[in-house]
Image (cartoon, grey):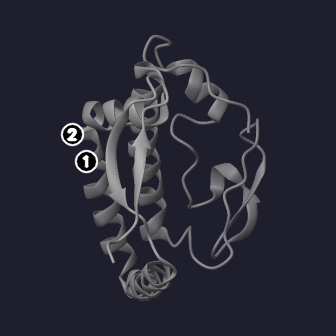
Amino acid sequence: MSQPTLDVIAPATAEVIATVPAATAADVDAAVRRAATAQRSWAAAAPADRARLLRRFAAVVDEHIEELAQLEVREAGHTVGNARWEAGNVRDLLDYAAAGAPNGCWAGRSRWRAASTSRSWSRSASSGSSPRGTSRCPSRPGGSPRRWRRATPSSSSPPRRPR
């Protein structure tokens, strides 16, 4: 018996752009086991090594932004500008995560909390609650997300969707 397949359809044209094997329940179970093993290895890695790997991944994404954008256009029907922004945002978030990795910012139950002012409170892994300016964890690139969006050229960065 042959393995079932799924068609990948371009939303803009309804044309079949690829045919891929369908995953079985056993495939999903195997993927979950591999992910659990990989997570243990990732958690055991030194923070500086995790940061280095995240930066390297960000560099590869940056080298392939146009290719990634074209895939997004074909598979999800996004506009080219939006797809380029998405790929650039992935790169930026990888760099952002890499900046916190050596400081232990993403360890345990630590979470960065978005806020509109620089005097807001955040929680880091070791310092508890502190004014954001004194935390050893990074803020989002360029300060608050609102300022970050305005600083990018509108032609290559369409407005963000509300969360």
The residue at the point 32 percent across, 72 percent down is 2
The residue carrying pointer 2 sits among few (fewer than 14), some (14 to 19) or many (20 or more) residues within 10 Å by Cα, namely: few
Q: Do tag 1 and tag 2 residues touch (Cβ < 8 Å)? A: yes
Residue at the image point whose x is 34% and y is 36% from the top: 71
Look at mark 1 in the image and give the residue it sits on: 59
In the rendered image of this protein, does residue 125 appear above or below residue 146? below
3 versus 142 height, above or below: below
Residue 148 location (% of width, % of height) = 56, 29
**For the N terminus, which image quadrant?**
bottom left
Horizontal arrangement in the rendering, residue 75 relative to residue 143 (left or right) = left
Residue drawn 40% across and 21% down? 80
Residue sitting farthest toward the top: 155
Of the residues shown, which amino acid type is indicated by label 1? Ala
Q: Residue at x 43, y 85 (%)?
A: 30
Using a 10 Å C-alpha cutoff, classify the residue at mark 1 as few (fewer than 14 neighbours), some (14 to 19) or many (20 or more).
some
* Dot in front, 1 or 2: 2
Tell me: residue 126, above or below residue 122: below
**Of residues 123 and 76, the one drawn nearer to the viewer in this rendering:** 76
Marks 1 and 2, Cα distance to the nearest angstrom? Answer: 6 Å
Mark 1 falls on what kind of element?
Answer: helix
> Residue type at mark 2?
Glu
Residue 135's quadrant in the figure? bottom right
Query: x%, y% of residue 68?
Result: 32, 38
Secondary element at image label 2: helix
Q: Which residue is mark 2?
A: 63
Image x and y of residue 100, in percent: 49, 61
